[in-house]
Amino acid sequence: MTSASAINDLIPVHCYLHRVFPSGAYNETAKRLVRDRLFQPRKDCDPFFLICPVDWDAQESVADRNWRMQLQGWTMFHPVMNFFDEYDDKQEALSFFVDILKDWWSNYSDDPDDVLTTRMPSSYAWYDMAVGFRTLIIAFFLNRIKFFELDAASDDLLVVQQCAAKHLRHLANRRVFSLNNHGFFQIHGLMMLLREVQVQNAEEYWQYGLRRMEELVASQFDELGVHVEHSPHYHFYSFITLEAVVETGLYDQSKLIKERKQVASAARKWLVDGENRPYCVGDSILTQQDGFEAGAAGDGVAVGKFVVGDFSASGYLIARSQWSENSGNTSTLFLMGMYNSKAHKHRDCLSFEWICRGQRIVVDGGKYGYKSDKWRNYALSYKAHNSIDIGDFDILKVKPYGSCLERPITHLNGVIEFTGELSYPALGHRRTLISHPDCWVVVVDQVWSKRRRYMSRYHHFSPDLALKSLVESSISLSVKELGDEIYVELFNSDRVPSVYLGSEQYMQGFVSEKDYKISEALAIEEGPTNTVSWKPISIISRSSQKSEEAASEFLRLYSHQLSAREVEEIKARCTLNEPLIDRVPHYTFLDGHLPGWPVGERTVRIYHKGLPVNAHLRVLKKAVGRRNKLMVQLPGATDRSKGYLDFQRYSWGGQYNRNVLTLSDPTITSDNDLSLGWFQGSPGVFGVDAAEAMIREVLRVGNILEKDVVIFGSSGGGFAALKLAERFDAAQVIAINPQIFLYNYTKSYFNRMLKSVYPGFEENDFINKFKDRIVVSEKSFFRTGKTFIFQNRCDEKHMKRHLGPLLKKVGNGLAVVESENALDLNMDSVIYYDDAERGHSPPSNSETMALLRRIDCLSMVG
């Protein structure tokens, strides 16, 4: 070892392992930082001005662990160190340092030399990282005092030396040594301080430090050069630390450190996407990295247009475009299966990220930060990652497994297969990704358990993506501003998936791509499924054509591993996200708000208190010189052989001189066999209220007045129209052969609805509790807008069981019009017609138009 007294050169500031910013960055603030003694360790923190005596345990900031650690680590000197060598008043900066050191020393000088803390201590005074920071800062100022020959009072210098000696004794104690990235700061602090002070047992300390640094490097970077703390971002952070350590020359005699630095340097290019941003598993954030060489021909295994980095022994698998590909057009697929310790580890085993031709699509939750709050808890949880939550199983409470990934498999046409498996006595999870990274990814999960558990699977998408449509388990996303579409198809889910965007109620739909910054982003949850065995499959593709290609390729490779039902389901839905109506675009809006009023046809879905409402909307060219008008059409009985969504009469829209909204009954879903639901919805959400929400949203975006609305339906749709009359005072309402008292309708239909929508209710109890939902009341009549009922006198059941009782209740106020009589448009009316052939069945198109012309021959029907 070289004598410390003979070393008086100026050590570069970055060798002290703190955050490095160019010295010129402080031109405007340097004097303020020193004179005002400002402490602001992060941008999200309020400025804190240090006045001695300092509350070193920071009782007022007890929840912010990072802030407290940085206070004890004296990181208020990190910016000062950066500009110190050019600062015009070094004595002033030195006084700041000495005052802080003496104040701290007055509190902790009598502490034992072997204080050992937990990861979340009550005091951070002897926390490993804080001690490492402090020691390096002390070494820096001792180096600058000597090099610049600064004046320091003998008493002050004695205190500095005593403090330095205590830190040496502490760090030379094996008991306090941390075999993780914090250990770098501990051991390098020890070595840098040895360089500046004279101690009797310096050689013993030196050899101890060298052996520990070798141990650290070997434990932090494996034989493939991968940093083992589960975070690509921390690979770069730790490599910069290692690089600065090596640059000091203090470890030149170690062959292991030199070799491990070389492979760690080479691994960096694999841990970033085409824009040199780390994959966001573990404590990673999306910050561009530099200072390393790009890959070249021969790096990795070539597979068509891609190269594969096999770090399966470490816990990472990466496939990316050839190194020569333009950075903005690079595709990458990244799978993580690493668990070595709890350091920077999230519940993200077998999570993955996919970037397709430069666009981030499937993304992980990110780091957030170390502030103990709900966002940090979210970032650590299963919910923030692209993996599976298996009930009450917590991966962080079991023994680390190292890597759970298998060697990659390559197929023809550039198709790549990544697989990883977690296997425990009571449960297991095997994930396979089959991908053509430029086009699509198929995700196959097999989960099993010895007992029934609730299982959920999550997919998270970039904040750049917006939801375009959600139809059953087919989801369409669009790339904001670009308009490109991403298709997601989910198989083997026993329920319609939940889609979240920034929901604090369910704590889902967020990513953190920068420190302490939360962004809203779409998240899909499948489940929870209560089972012992589950095999959800998803296809994520860049276009509908590519989704067909993905499904076909997947079936070619894996149909032998699927059941006949699974194969048929995938074949049947090979074209992803088909529109609700052929060649009519579909849009889903989670927040219940329609964004605009485009001319033409589309189907839309909004959610009212969680109940989905589907509608076909036909928008005419905006009227010039007159108001927009709206026709609302409601369905009666649905032919279930054609599906559960039923936009009855939507094709009639072109015959009306107005915009047309055609609703499907939200009561009728793929989960039941109802053909008639009367807009009952669910016990918690009345479907008529949901229909009202959709209509009012259309009125809002179309700038339509309520008095310019006509609501029309027949049979069960007529019932819904009359119930909506209670909610729209000025609208005109037309009902043909409506049900009015649902319990008087055919018992088999009524009881089927009762059993499906209101399970557990006996008929009498149901009628008493929900009578307002199943009976048309007087509020449907005598409004500002008029109500018209067309009734076929040949429909005897409805004449006797529905219209008859209604007329007894409100008959005195209704005009009863025979077919040959003129109609008084100023009164609510019952208009009879005779059609023995059709009975209760609704009139034909031409007959219906004829009836409607009797009410409004000029403005409603063309």
Image: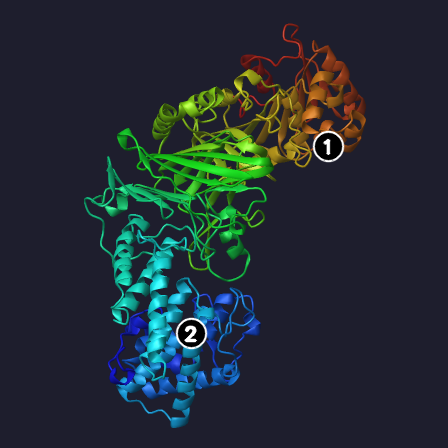
Please tell me which of labels 2 and 1 falls first in the chain. 2
Residue 642 to residue 154: above or below: above
Identify the residue under disc 1: 779
Q: Is residue 632 visible?
A: yes
User: Residue 336 location, x and y as percent?
Assistant: 40, 46
- Horizontal relation, residue 461 to residue 734: left or right: left
Residue 554: image tag: none
Find numbered disc 2 in the image and state the secondary structure of the residue it sits on: helix
Task: Tell me the residue at 50%/25% (across/down).
Answer: 657
Q: Is residue 290 visible?
A: no
User: Residue 76 location, x and y as percent?
Assistant: 41, 76
User: Residue 290 location, x and y as percent?
Assistant: 27, 58
Task: Tell me the residue at 27%/80% (across/down).
Answer: 86
The amino acid type found where label 1 is placed reads Lys
- Horizontal relation, residue 86 to residue 732: left or right: left
The amino acid type found where label 2 is placed reads Leu
